Amino acid sequence: EPTLILGASLNHFPRTSVMPSIATIVGSPSTSVESGRYLNRVLPIFPDQVDRIPKYIQGIGRVLKVMLADYQRDNKKLPKKIIYYRYDNNSDHDMVLTEELKEIQECCLGLKDAREMVCE
């Protein structure tokens, strides 16, 4: 069954730094894992308040939309499933589930060919 496997991580600089946190997202664009080809995106995540560490990857839905377009271009169809692995060292697990998963599901529902897609 065609499946898009995603992995994501949110990494933080010390709060004394003016640097944003960095989100990395990697996906498999092919139905064959053996292809050795992967999609990756890096997003700066700025805190909503000074001295606050972002707790989830804001904008993951926009990144997923691009990755799904790449997947569809390479495979002539959208995946039937999305499996999302999230490294969760410094993040708030509940926020990851509520905010990131919500963005992923909204992205999938917004695609006309994705009505039967399952996000796990």
Image (tube, rainbow, N blue to C red):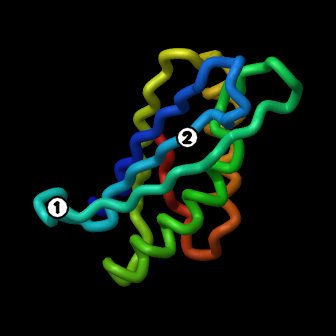
Identity of the residue drawn at 41% across and 56% down: 40
Quarter-wise, where is residue 92 in the image?
Answer: top right
What label sits on residue 36 in the rendered view?
1
Q: Earlier in the sequence, mark 1 or mark 2?
A: 2
Foreground residue, 119 or 21? Answer: 21
Q: Which residue in the structure is indicated by mark 2?
A: 23
- Closer to viewer: mark 1 or mark 2: 2
Residue 38 showing in the rendered view: yes
Quarter-wise, where is residue 1 in the image?
Answer: bottom left
Dot 1 and dot 2 residues touching (CB under 8 Å): no
Identity of the residue drawn at 54% across and 32% down: 10
Left or right of 2 in this view: 20:
right
Residue 104 showing in the rendered view: no
Q: Secondary structure at mark 1?
A: loop
Foreground residue, 97 or 19? Answer: 19
Q: Is residue 77 above or below residue 9?
A: below
Query: Where residue 62 appears, x then y in whole percent?
Result: 65, 59
Neighbour tally class for label 1: few under 14, some 14-19, many 20 plus, Cα within 10 Å? few
Rounded to the nearest angstrom, the CA distance separating label 1 from label 2 is: 22 Å
Q: Residue furthest left?
A: 34
Left or right of 62 in this view: 69:
left
Query: Where residue 36 appears, x then y in whole percent?
Result: 16, 61
Q: Residue furthest right?
A: 49
Query: Where residue 23 appears, x then y in whole percent?
Result: 55, 40
Identity of the residue drawn at 11% across and 60% down: 34
Q: Is residue 5 above or below residue 53?
A: below
Foreground residue, 92 or 75? Answer: 92
Say what amino acid the circle numbered 1 marks. Answer: Gly
Identity of the residue drawn at 49% across and 56% down: 41
Quarter-wise, where is residue 115 in the image?
Answer: bottom right
Query: Where residue 24 appears, x then y in whole percent?
Result: 48, 44
